[in-house]
Amino acid sequence: MHKLEAALAHWRAGELDAADGLCAELMSADAFFLRGLIADKRGDLAGAAEHFEAAVHARDGDAVFRLRLAQSLLALRRGVEARPHLERAVELTPAQHPNRRPLLGLLMRVLADLGDEPAVESLARSALAENPDDAEAISELGLSLYRQARTEEAREQLHPLAKRSTAAAIRRALMLPHINESMEQIEAVRARLDRELDELLAARLEPIEHPERDVGLTAFFIAYHGKNDRELLMKLARLYRKVYPATKAKLEASRGKARLRIGFVSRFFYGHSVARTTHGLIRDLPRSRFEVVVFCIAPRDDEWARRIRADCDRYVAVPEDLEAVRRAIEDARLDVLLFADIGMDALTYFLAFWRLAPLQLTTWGHSSTSGIDSIDGFVSAAALESEEAQEHYSEELLRLPAFYNPGYRRPAMAAAPRSRAELGLPQRGPLYLCPQFLFKLHPEFDSALAAILRGSPQAHLLLLAAKREAKSRVRERIDAALGADAARVQFLDRMPASHFYEVLAAVDVVLDPFHFGGCNTSCEAFAFGRPIVTLPARFLRGRYTYACYREMQIDDCIASSPEEYARIAIALGHDRDRRESLSARIRERSDVLFERTDAAHALADAIDERLKGTA
């Protein structure tokens, strides 16, 4: 005990080496725990986890030991291993203990990250049984129900809390259906959101210091309504300006610098569509004119993360903490800040309310305007946008005279693809695939699917499955629209990219849904010569496939109406010669879609022009 007391004294004095040396001579639970604290202080996360695990083995019933081990494992992104230690820590902590509530909150967040929503729901309901007025448990239960696509249940759960909490009221307003059942429902939901935003704007509200945590939602699902969202998103941003004290004062542009410093920020700089469509800009911006800094929120380690890290001039890993991200960006003294996406993630959405660079831009990582007055420009491409497109954006629309998908890498299969039988797919008749998340399937798209299957009685349609509730609601909608033909619709579970490429190679025709189509998936389908039927929409989010066809100078599959869309799809499914001829042309011309550098150079010119105008 004498050595442990001496080690503790060294620890309190900040003498880590001395404390660690004494603890190394001991084999007690407390010595292991102190060594874990020392390793954590040094930033040695793996060492900390190892020592905390030894402490737990030595003293199984200590809730604090369990918690610290779980926290170390979470920092190492080992949530599955952390879960049982958190669950045990909760069991060991009495109901009235002040640590129990924070433990429950952490466990619910971990369970949510692991995708175990039934467990989150059960734990939240248990917490409410202990304390019916537990605001955090009410909030977590509402969020869990919403993540399960049980929107009306979630809104009902939050209703009492929304009466006394600004954050809860905004969160409740932003709970939009994941799956839209009809045009009438879409109109009603938009009207409800508009009304609730007006009511909040008119009310006396308390400030929200951390909306990224306390609201925790964005208006993500509004983008799938097939409508112009500009006014609603600007109204939402005005509401946040009322309650969120973010600084938006303009910063002066740099003068006389040899190179401009541009920052890219996102939490999706790993194997995600945002990384794949932003990497080319990071890599190819001309270094004679730009220094490129990447701010990666809660970084992961995979192939795409490593590419981005290697292809920037400076890489800044930042924790999942808005203030830490903001300070890191401010310290970099940027000339330009480009948000790879705004609207998919609450942290970067609220970060965008701050003025952190003289010129702040966003782009198609989330294919919708931000509505935020501190975002100056939306980076797009001339080939993507309709003539009236500026009306869809609160930002200045930058229509780059270049291909929209910068530096996109052509995907390839490692081996010969398996057959339909080996993949568990229907073996007879035309095989159609719509490779999009179910929330992209607009109710108006159902009639096209019905017409295709009605006109092709031997055909089968493949859709990608999602959460159970979303799949159930899409299945109900499809059953109603397709009748008996719905039996020929098969849902595929989520799969790794290599498996998905085999499915692409096996199908006859890919269907691009309207009004929100494919982007990454379209490039991947074209890489394997798959024809895609598309109906260009009014908005950016429904025009990517169309832009690819324009680049390849192919127009066989571009429809002008839902009826023509179905006719093209049926004809391609039935006419093998026509389909194979078109596939050969796509394979021959699709090289123009990949490894392009012109967008990065066009962006450089656009930035120069705008900063000269503000200098």
Image (cartoon, grey):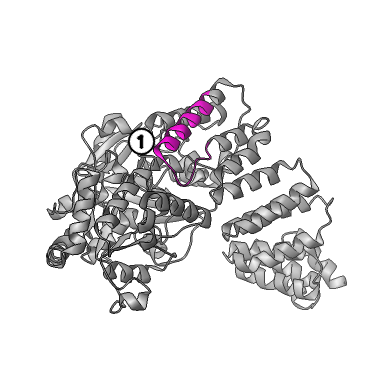
Q: Amino acid at mark 1?
A: Lys
Residue at 39 percent across and 43 percent down: it is: 224
Query: Vertically, is 511 above or below 259?
Result: below
Q: Position of residue 376 (x, y in %)?
A: 35, 34
Pick out the residue farthest to the front.
484
Q: Is 182 included in the stretch rendered in magenta?
A: yes
Q: In which quadrant of the rendered view does residue 511 lie? A: bottom left
Can the viewer see residue 314 in this picture? yes
Q: Would you say residue 275 is visible in this rendering?
A: no
Where are the magenta residues, as a range? 174-198
Please state which of residues 42 and 346 is positioned toward the viewer in this rendering: 346
In the rendered structure, the answer to whether residue 513 lies left or right of residue 113 reads left
How many residues crowd around disc 1 within 10 Å: few (fewer than 14), some, or many (20 or more)?
some
Residue 443 sits inside the magenta stretch: no
Q: Is 430 on the left-hand or right-hand side of 486? A: left
Q: Is residue 41 above or below residue 102?
A: below
Residue corresponding to mark 1: 227
